[in-house]
Image: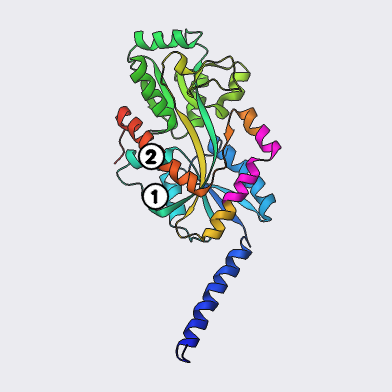
Amino acid sequence: MTNTHFPKALLAFALVLAGFVARADWPERTITLVVPLAAGGSTDITARLVAEKFAGELGQTVVVDNRPGAGGNIGGAYVAKAPPDGYTLLMSTSTIATNVTLYKNMGFDLQKDLIPVSQVALIPNVLVVNNNVPVKNLREFVEYARQKKGVVNFGSAGNGTSQHLSGALFNSMAHGEMVHVPYKGGAPANVDLLSGQIQAVFSPLVEVLPYIDSGKLRALGVTTKARSPRLPDVPAIAEELPGFDVVLWNGVFAPAGTPPAVVRRLGATISNILQDPSVCKIFADQGSTPVGNTPAEFKKNLTVEIDKWGKLVKLSGARVD
């Protein structure tokens, strides 16, 4: 090596070493976990649990920042454009995969601008109805929806959400014509369901369990292939409509360019959190299933999810320009 090249090589080595040290010291300050949906929903509930456990594992404060709007795209774009240093993360849902087909322009490229870190949980939706709806079980509701075409309505957290697509799939398979009523979040939809303004919602189970347990809402069917251990007496919709299967998930993303060492540590931390018996019990009580897969596994699953949800979006006819 010549004397001319030596200073350049030394500088390059110093930069690499500095980057390594920076990654090794991560995290050194507060981490922000962005939830692109309103407070009080299933993803927000999960994010706050993860943030609390993150803080204990990483030794730094983790704050949840709700940035709802545009079906989650506002929060997603915010994180996609954030510095890739591991201090701004996204806790999103399967809606982010839906939006690839639903929106002409999300404001960011999901597969280029964000790195999948780990899926956190799988959450079934459950078909719940107001107690004034004159049905007692799933079979009666299927017949009711067929007979009252254009009269029965169902609410959702917005166009293209899992609640909306669950209803669209139900309409298709049951040959019904329930009217979709989109809201700006699941919480306001549930409020109107309780008051009788709408008749049904395909809600994430965790959001309506208190109302089911208290008898304020009637659960007719879960959207997963099998019954939920949390509601063993409630049938899967697939028992009446074979092939029906809709599963909501949530997961953590980081901005593209985040150092691999930070991504790996984030993924390992999430995996550790989801093996904690106390966390597993909370998820079980909510009817959710913890995941905690690797970044590579999440990336592979995301590709499959984009295709699956894209087909449901096309079935629903939903489109946002």
* Cα distance in 3D space between marks 1 and 2: 10 Å
- Residue 128, position in %: x, y? 50, 19
Queried whether the magenta region covers residue 222, the answer comes back as no
Q: In this view, does 72 lie to the left or right of 124?
A: left
Queried whether the magenta region covers residue 276, the answer comes back as yes
> Which one is in front, 67 or 273?
273
> Which one is in front, 215 or 313?
313
Marker disc for residue 218: none
Query: Does dot 1 land on a helix, a strand or a loop?
Result: helix
Residue ID at (53%, 73%): 16
Residue ID at (29%, 41%): 321
Q: What stretch is highlighted in magenta?
A: 267-281
Amino acid at pointer 2: Ile
- Residue 217, position in %: x, y? 55, 17
Q: Are marks 1 and 2 in contact (CB under 8 Å)?
A: yes
State whether the magenta stretch is mostly helix, strand or loop: helix
- Res 69 visible: no
Q: Mark 1 points at which residue?
A: 111
State the residue lying farthest toward the bottom. Answer: 3
**Residue 284 lies in quadrant:** top right
Q: How was this image coloured?
A: rainbow
Residue ID at (66%, 56%): 60
Local crowd at mark 1 within 10 Å, few (<14), some, or many (≥20)?
some
- Residue 232, position in %: x, y? 59, 17
Residue ID at (58%, 17%): 216
Amino acid at pointer 1: Gln
Q: Mark 2 points at which residue?
A: 306
Asked if residue 139 is positioned above or below residue 209 in the image, the reply reads above
